[in-house]
Amino acid sequence: MKTPTTRLTSTDRRQQILDQATKLFARRGYEGTTTRQIARQAGINEALIFRHFGDKDGLYWAIIEQKCQMGARRAKLMQTLDSRSDDRTILATLAETVLRRNFEDSSLARLLLFSALENHRLSRRFFRVYVAQNYDSIAAYIRRRVRQGKFRGVDAQLAARGFLGMVVYHFWIQEIFGGKRFQKFDLKKVSNTLADIWLRGMRSSPSERSRQEARKSLK
Amino acid sequence: MKTPTTRLTSTDRRQQILDQATKLFARRGYEGTTTRQIARQAGINEALIFRHFGDKDGLYWAIIEQKCQMGARRAKLMQTLDSRSDDRTILATLAETVLRRNFEDSSLARLLLFSALENHRLSRRFFRVYVAQNYDSIAAYIRRRVRQGKFRGVDAQLAARGFLGMVVYHFWIQEIFGGKRFQKFDLKKVSNTLADIWLRGMRSSPSERSRQEARKSLK
DNA sequence: CGCGTATAAGTAAGCGTTTGCTTACATGAA
DNA sequence: TTCATGTAAGCAAACGCTTACTTATACGCG
């Protein structure tokens, strides 16, 4: 009866449970996933989950915690914004990276949405790491370009939200709402088009630019 | 013990259950809401729910069905796009209306998101009525303006998605992700700013416009 | 190196509770 | 009187979680 399976170390097993649970929580949400499902998916006894994580909530926390650490480490995505390329390249690259990452593995996005919708207490840090932080980076970039007279002087936070909005919303529509069943889009085309619209919308017109330069030379 | 309450007619009671259930499903999702909660919220016995709707799924269907009918009827929101105002007014008004409606009652948006995330089978029609249809209206508007030489010739579907993306994403961040706890925004300012960015990004430059007119006169 | 033992990985079984849902009965309105 | 509105009570299954128990494995000791 007993299949003498090789035992895993505590950390390995912990990680395996974490991985399987992440998949399920991302697919069906916290309330929609049972600890029994997770155990079966991981091929282990349910009790192991509780030994490792205390309770279901603890498991969920551990998942978010892990995703946050991964997110903090990979925050260098936003280094794109410091590159010396032109604005169009920077923004199209940023958009393409965000889209590609999410399309390759939508579980993080789904987890974020689920936790925001159904479990606000747990999701605040999640939100800060994956959403608010990115805004701040983009907003800082925008403010710099405004100071340099390249962008119009609009609310940087709002403009940043506008850009990410275009990009992330497109992903959500395609992936979460199933829009991809009706229409497919070329990733590069989407990135370029959206970046282009936003950029033209932000660039200061020549007249504004000369006014800005005039103001500068006064000081 | 018995409080001799006045009885409701079948349709009235049905509607009352629908209303209360909508609130709860919007707040906690399908899996996160129990039929007992709904009964208590409506101040009735649980069995009444099953008499009216068969089972929990039937109740959820009835809610989505009702919301879809309401959505189909109010599709005239998009008539804004046919008004004779200038583009800036049209778009800012559209944005403001979408934002105001959602901020006043976020339950529809939450319901839409929840059903997309956790119950894909039920959500397709929902998606078509509340999302896809709006795209088509805006895309048609864009194509018209492109034909008139006022907008650049970008993919209309994508551009429409970009515009709604900016607006709807802003709402989601504020309301669903709790962004409003960190920063509040003036509704009119948001609408105007986002509409402005998008519009400047879409307008054809004078050189393009003259080229377009040259092409026109050739025919 | 072999070996016994402590320790932690892993399990079977089932606890009390809640879940969606049903049944049998009461009661107000036409 | 009739019949649909409404309820009390509870069922089987599934829920999160615990307990009591095996068993593989790392490791100190001779």
Image (tube, coloured by chain):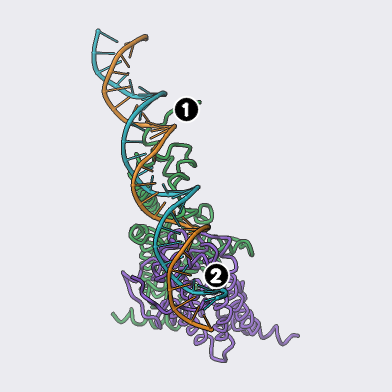
Chain colours: A green, B purple, C orange, D cyan
- Cβ atoms at labels 1 and 2 below 8 Å apart: no
> Nearer the observer, disc 1 or disc 2?
2
Where's the N terminus of chain B, which quadrant? bottom left
Q: Is residue B209 visible?
A: yes
Label 2 environment density (alpha carbons within 10 Å; few <14, some 14–19, many ≥20): some
What amino acid is labelled 1 in the image?
Answer: Thr
At x 39% / y 75%, what residue is drawn?
A: A149
Circle 1 sits on which residue?
A5
Measuring 45% from the left and 82% from the top, which residue is drawn there?
A: B96
Separation of disc 1 and disc 2 at Cα?
Answer: 49 Å
Residue A163 visible = no
Question: Mark 2: which amino acid?
Answer: Ala
Residue B146: name its quadrant: bottom right
Secondary structure of the residue carrying numbered label 1: loop
Chain identifier of the residue bearing label 2 in the image: B
Q: Residue furthest bottom?
A: B84
User: The C terminus of chain B lies in which quarter of the figure?
Assistant: bottom right
> x%, y% of residue A69?
36, 50
Q: Are marks 1 and 2 on the same chain?
A: no
Which disc, if any, is residue B62?
Answer: 2
Q: Is residue A20 above or below residue A71?
A: above
Asked which quadrant contains residue A142, the reply is bottom left
Q: Is residue B215 above or below residue A121?
A: below
Quarter of the figure with residue C6 = top left
Q: As rendered, which of C9 and B172 lies closer to the eye? A: C9
Image location (x, y in percent) of residue B7: 45, 78
Question: Can you give x and y, in whole percent of width and height, for residue B8 in the image?
Answer: 47, 78
Tell me the SS state at disc 2.
helix
Other residues around mark 1 within 10 Å, as few (<14) / some (14–19) / many (≥20): few
